[in-house]
Image (cartoon, rainbow, N blue to C red):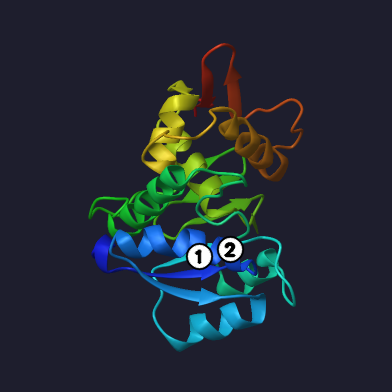
């Protein structure tokens, strides 16, 4: 998929935002399909192939989180940006998201499942089980867990995790990693306040426990 030929579904109920974002996207060579509310967004998505969805969380009729669920993008999707934001930052994130979608994340070898203390991570199937029960992770949560679990014991800085998960750290607060780690612990750890799997290395970052 060529990023310059990509079709972007832009979903926002504010006319001013639609105009503000459509112009730089079209100038960058993208085709922009607009929708003003959640219902229209789902119709547009069903009508034609879409490479990227830019979705406002606060929408009339069907809010952005509900649209996210229906599209199967996972809550939290691939990335998020809060208003106000600069057009330069917005364009940078769009380009990065399309690059990630176009680039294979793994080599041709099937990665082996990782199992430890009742936790099983299957990178090939992108599934996670705890005690034999499936656990639903967002796209970002899974990528963060996969990165840490692939090298047990290795200490990753927040900057390194941003680079691994998003392919860059431009415009991103390293503390974003802390939020995703907290969510992972709530889903995976027996006692999130006393983690045994994803460990904090004070002053540095995080590591996955040694097997």
Residue 180: image x %, image y %?
61, 39
Give the camera-side residue of 3 and 86. 86
Mark 1 Cα shell of 10 Å, populated few (<14), some (14-19), many (≥20): few
Give the camera-side residue of 139 and 39. 39
Give the camera-side residue of 37 and 209. 37
The answer to whether residue 128 is above or below residue 200 is: below
- At x 77%, y 27%, the residue is 193
Q: Quadrant of the N terminus?
A: bottom left
Label 2, on which residue? 16
Residue 144: image x %, image y %?
50, 40
Tell me the element at label 1.
helix
Residue 139 visible here: yes
Residue 93: image x %, image y %?
42, 48
Taking the image as shown, residue 115 lies to the left or right of residue 57, namely left
- At x 46%, y 88%, the residue is 47
Residue 1 visible here: no
Residue 138: image x %, image y %?
58, 54
Q: Are marks 1 and 2 in contact (CB under 8 Å)?
A: yes
Total marks placed: 2
Taking the image as shown, residue 185 lies to the left or right of residue 31, namely right
Label 1, on which residue? 19
């Amino acid at each position: 998929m060529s990023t310059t030929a990509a079709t972007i579904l832009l979903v926002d109920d504010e006319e001013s935002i639609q105009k503000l974002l459509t112009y730089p996207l079209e100038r960058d060579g993208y085709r922009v399909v607009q929708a003003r509310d959640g219902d229209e967004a789902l119709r547009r998505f069903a009508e034609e192939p879409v490479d990227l969805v830019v979705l406002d969380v606060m929408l009339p009729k069907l809010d952005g989180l509900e649209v996210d669920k229906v599209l199967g993008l996972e809550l939290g999707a691939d990335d998020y940006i809060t208003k106000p934001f600069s057009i330069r930052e917005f364009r940078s994130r769009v380009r990065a998201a399309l690059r990630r979608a176009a680039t294979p994340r793994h080599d041709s070898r099937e990665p082996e499942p990782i199992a430890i203390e009742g936790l099983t991570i299957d990178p090939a199937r992108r599934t996670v089980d705890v005690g034999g029960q499936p656990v639903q992770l967002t796209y970002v949560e899974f990528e963060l867990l996969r990165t840490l679990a692939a090298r047990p014991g290795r200490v990753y800085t927040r900057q390194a995790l941003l680079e691994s998960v998003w392919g860059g750290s431009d415009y991103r607060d390293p503390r974003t990693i802390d939020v995703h780690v907290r969510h992972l612990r709530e889903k995976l750890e027996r006692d999130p306040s006393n983690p045994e799997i994803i460990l904090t290395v004070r002053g540095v970052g995080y590591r996955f426990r040694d097997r």
